[in-house]
Image: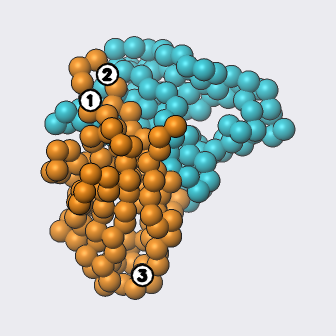
Chain colours: A cyan, B orange
Amino acid sequence: GESVGLHLPTLSVQEGDNSIINCAYSNSASDYFIWYKQESGKGPQFIIDIRSNMDKRQGQRVTVLLNKTVKHLSLQIAATQPGDSAVYFCAENLASGGSYIPTFGRGTSLIVHP
Amino acid sequence: EPEVTQTPSHQVTQMGQEVILRCVPISNHLYFYWYRQILGQKVEFLVSFYNNEISEKSEIFDDQFSVERPDGSNFTLKIRSTKLEDSAMYFCASSLRRTSGLTDTQYFGPGTRLTVL
C-alpha cells in the first residue's frame, strides 16, 4: 500500500534473495501496465510491461504478475543484487488519442544489503 | 545506446520569472512528453506532443505552461510566471509512434530540478 507523507514503503532484502514489490492500481479500464525503476537523481527507467490480456510476463530476472480481479500488479526480482536498490513504481495506462497516458504510483523503495 | 538528454540539470529562479527547460529526445522518436515530480511525490503527467501539436495534457498543464519543438532536435517546456509550487523535478520522455501491436515505451531523461524562490 501507499504511505502518507514523504515516506515510501520500503522493502529490505539480502543480496541473492528474491524480491516482490506490489502495486494496487485504480482504474479497471486500464489496459497497459509498466514497472519503472528510479535510481536516486535519475529519471524513471522502463523495466517491464504487461497488457491486460495477459496475467504474467517474464523478462531477464524480472516477472510481472497482473490480477485484474483485484486490480493488483506485482514485480518479482530474482536473485536481487545491490544494483537493484532503487524506487520501483508501477504505472497504469489508458489509451488516449493513439498514445498511452500513464498514471504513476508513489513507489516502493527497495534496499538490497550485500 | 541513444538516450534522452535534458538541460540544465538544475535551474533556480525567482517567483514570477519565466523559465525554459530543454530536452533533446531520442532522434527517431516521434512522441514527446513532459512530466513533473514534486519531491517525495508521484511522477505526474503534464503533456504529450506529436506532429507539432499537443496530443494530451493534464489539469496541471494550465495557461502558464507551453511546449515547443523549435527545431528538429529540441523539445522545450516553458513556464511563463513561475510559482513556488512549480518547484519539482521535470522529466522529458520520448517514444516511437505507437503502431498496432507494439508497445509505446517511453524513455525518460535525467530530469531538470527546478527551484523557485
Residue B56 appears in the picture as rendered? no
Q: Please tell me which residue is depicted at 52% across the width and 31% down the height of the picture.
A: A47
Residue B98 bears which disc, if any?
Answer: 1
Q: State whether residue A111 is above or below residue B7.
A: above
Q: State whether residue B85 is above or below residue A20.
A: below
Q: Quadrant of the C terminus of chain B?
A: bottom left
Cα distance between the residues tagged 2 and 1: 6 Å
* Residue at which label 2 appears: B102
Cα distance between the residues tagged 3 and 2: 41 Å
* Residue at which label 3 appears: B13
Chain letter of the residue beneath label 2 in the structure image = B
Number of numbered labels in the structure image: 3
Asked whether the residues under marks 1 and 3 belong to the same chain, the reply is yes
Q: Please tell me which residue is depicted at 19% across the width and 33% down the height of the picture.
A: A98
Q: Count residues near mark 1 (Cα–Cα under 10 Å), then give few for <14, some for 14-19, many for 20+.
A: some
Cα distance between the residues tagged 1 and 3: 37 Å
Seen from the viewer's position, the closer of residues A91 and B51 is B51
Q: Are marks 2 and 1 in contact (CB under 8 Å)?
A: yes
Q: Count residues near mark 2 (Cα–Cα under 10 Å), then give few for <14, some for 14-19, many for 20+.
A: few
Residue B82 bears which disc, if any?
Answer: none
Q: Secondary structure at mark 1?
A: loop
Please provide percent x and percent y for residue B14. 40, 85
Q: Quadrant of residue B37?
A: bottom left
What amino acid type should be assigned to the residue bearing mark 3?
Answer: Thr
Please provide percent x and percent y for residue B96. 31, 34
Q: Count residues near mark 3 (Cα–Cα under 10 Å), then give few for <14, some for 14-19, many for 20+.
A: some
